[in-house]
Amino acid sequence: MNARSRNGALNGGALNGGTWNGRAWNIAGLVTVGVVGLAAMIGLPLVLELSSLLDVTVYLILAILALSLALVWGYGGTLCFGQSAFFGLGAYAYAIAMFNIGESTIPFLLAIVLPAAFAALLGYFMFYGRISDVYLGVITLTVTLILFNAVNSTAGPEYQIGEARLGGFNGIPSIPPLNWPGMPDSALDLNDLFYVSIVLLMAVYFGLRWLLVSRFGRVIVAIRENEQRAGFLGYDARLYKLATFTLGGALAGLAGCLFANWGAFVSPTIFGLGQSAQIIIWVIVGGRGTLIGPVVGCIAIQWLTAFLGSAQLTKASLAQVVGPTVADALSSVMGFADLSNTSLILGAVLLAFVLLVPRGVMPSLLDLARFLVRRRPADALADKAERAT
Amino acid sequence: MSEGESVDLVLVLAIQVLFAMASLALISVGLAVIFGMMRVINLAHGEFLMLGGYSAIVANQHGVNLWIAMLVVAPLVVGAIGVVVERTLIRFLYGRMIDTMLATWGLSLFLIGLVTGIFGNTTVGISAPLGGMAIGNYRTSIYGLVVIAITAALLVAIYLVLRYTRLGLFARGTMQNPNMAAALGLSPPKVYAVTFGIGAALSGLAGALIAPISGVFPTIGIAYIAKAFITVIGGGAAILSGTISAAALFGAIQEVATYFTTPVFGVVITLAAAIVLIRLLPQGITGRFLKRWL
Amino acid sequence: MTGPAVLLETVDLGMRFGGVEAVSDVNFRLTEGELRCLIGPNGAGKSTFFKLLTGQLLPTRGKVLYRGRDISGIETHEVARLGIGIKTQVPSVFDGLSVRENLWIAASRGRPTRRANEMVDEILSRIALAGSAQRTVGQLAHGQRQWLELGIVLAGEPELILLDEPAAGMTHEEVVRTAELIREINRTRSLIVVEHDMQFIRMIASKVTVLDRGRVLVEDSMENILRHPTVRDVYLGKRVAA
């Protein structure tokens, strides 16, 4: 029995919605997310200074990126090692189009359509070529490296698309911000970008929730569970995987566009392996087969790395967080290594989760919650039977 | 250009192409051993190369002869690390290829972080021994020729091991039938640990040998990992013929593409060609041709 | 030609793996509404033949005709869309999903949601799993998984159903119930059943094809097959005597 099978792979799926229990869980989850989202949207600008709000904004943008892989990997079962390729393409497409067009409606759409088209092309190539999961991982990884290498080497003045200099490893600075559609003079300020990001994040979240209870969503989960059986039932697995992969590319592109807005800057590291690794870590930490997990995982990991990276962590400040004894122990173990070394920490987190918590945090927490509120004797029986198997 | 000069040019170019092929084979063969025999895709392969480079340099700084540091110390150190990694991580994940890829990627990041912590994020150089050699008006490095020769010797040695030893027998069985490793589930864990250790040792050796050419820095593995992957995946499960055929093909493509464009686009074109090859031959070159070869 | 129409036909079908001829020169013919059992000793080529019929393998010789159309080597999902339902030897179900979800996925292709839901309820009672509808399939007993897969196949409303060892690993009562189910299905559908449980075949069989070393050895009614001397030699002798 695989790890997912304990609580039904559809995340308390709508088909369990035939019973009161499953539907109640779904509604409770949706309401919670909606309330927290609205509260954050209204509350955060009131309590946070602009610089902190800017930090929050980037978490929201990256959470959209996390959701793109949550769909493709967590539900579709296709582990893409190069989700950052679509993220980067979205950012570059927006930047380049913006310098050439000046009004952001078309650049915004291009930032979604172009990565989606690239994902469709790559997906067609892979899924219709019957390439196995593992080779798929290697190919997506290689594609990311190709983009990184290619864009990285475009520093010379000859690499120019219209008005936009690609800038190679220096990146593209001073990217013009989004404006309200059709109004090139009313650009979004940083407060607006926060609102746009949180609204888009919630739209993507609820949109995916809807998608996953639709027939399409159930079929992609079924294909993840057993591709051969889905084929025997007349579903063309390649087509469904391709559609999922393409949608994932579009969402990553959207995140890329917002990211380019956030910093007004893009550089090739956006395509880098480090970026790809982070996306995978968000999803595996949060939990595959959930949507809220990767969002939480993304925000938690980003916060952790920012905290460790920026705080110039001293033993004293560490002691405030974890207590003096732990701080002593930590700094003697890691005496030589700088705690702001995110690579070390991300690597350790990834290793720990693959080996010890492969399902991720959120599914385990949801199980715990279900266990705590479980009252019906039938469920208790089922639980017993579950443990017996 | 006189006739003599164009002969010289052809010779120099030939050496360059040969070197590209040899270095591809060299950096890939450790990964190929681990993939061919264990069906494990080791994403920390680049970091094994990096550790090989650091081992050689540190040993050399402590007074060990450079050749001994490169040819003996580096493979021993990285081989030992490989055994530890297999015992503490990989063995829990057999049969779960995707999880193995993820775990070794975690290891890769961890090692980059660890080495950055120890040695700092700077390039440690080591000058190539033996100097240069003139071919007509052109110069070529003797060390490059030595790397070609060592690679050839290494491949011959692997052939002999595969052909004439018990470990080789096991390896050949596994290569012919991918399910063999699972079917031999009862086989002693020692075989896996040894295989992984040998693969790691070969990577360490490769990393040490390329150190004088490129220098060593914590993220150097990333520069090599894509090339090593495409060589191994493109070659298929047969360790030797797969590595050699893919290294020859991609080495040639890379040099020709570099000659007509830039080194960076040479790499980009090679990677793109590899992706097309994997699409056409999902089992690699040796999955279609040279089937019965080692 | 008289009589009922030919539904499935193989013409000089052959499959070679390296030097081994797993299936050779098989000319097989199934008419509409028929229930056919396919038997043979281990290594007779039953599984290979089955995979050739279901498009999982591309034949090296000959072709498979479904209603006169060559279907050899077409995509799995296209086989299904032609109206062929397949049950594999090892139950192939969606382990992580609930019983109801499994059936719903099968029933909902090409049907509106409401009709699919009705279909699921109907099949749940037919395969006696209504009480376990919300359970995760990974937790079901082996026999129940076999039935579930049968139910999944039925939910697609195929015209022809191919079953690979549907009674494998079942208790005696389950086998009896499965045989009943298959006879009931046969009232409206054609079936090909690959089996080697002779008792089970006696419960359902009308006509039996015996494969041996990749070739059709004999094709006849069950009673005649049991009396057939060559068949007794190659396959049945030991078992029936036992």
Image (spheres, coloured by chain):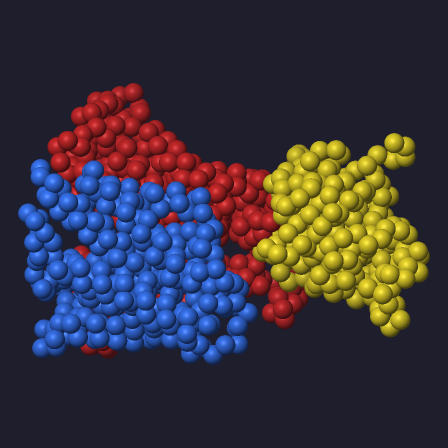
Chain colours: A red, B blue, C yellow
Residue B232 lies, in percent from the top left, at: 37, 56
Residue A339 lies, in percent from the top left, at: 20, 65
* Residue drawn at 21 percent across, 28 percent down: A161
Depth check: give the residue in front, A325 or A101: A101
Depth check: give the residue in front, A207 or A266: A266
In the image, C156: left or right of B24? right
Res C65 seen here: yes
Depth check: give the residue in front, C11 or A24: C11
Instruction: Decide: is A380 above or below B77.
Output: above
Residue A312 lies, in percent from the top left, at: 15, 61
Q: Quadrant of residue B152?
A: bottom left
* Residue drawn at 29 percent across, 71 percent down: B201
Instruction: Decide: is A98 above or below A123.
Output: above
Quadrant of the frame with the N terminus of chain A: bottom right
In the image, A5: left or right of C114? left
Res C104 seen here: no
* Residue drawn at 82 percent across, 64 percent down: C235
Instruction: Decide: is C152 above or below B205.
Output: above
In the image, B231: left or right of C54? left
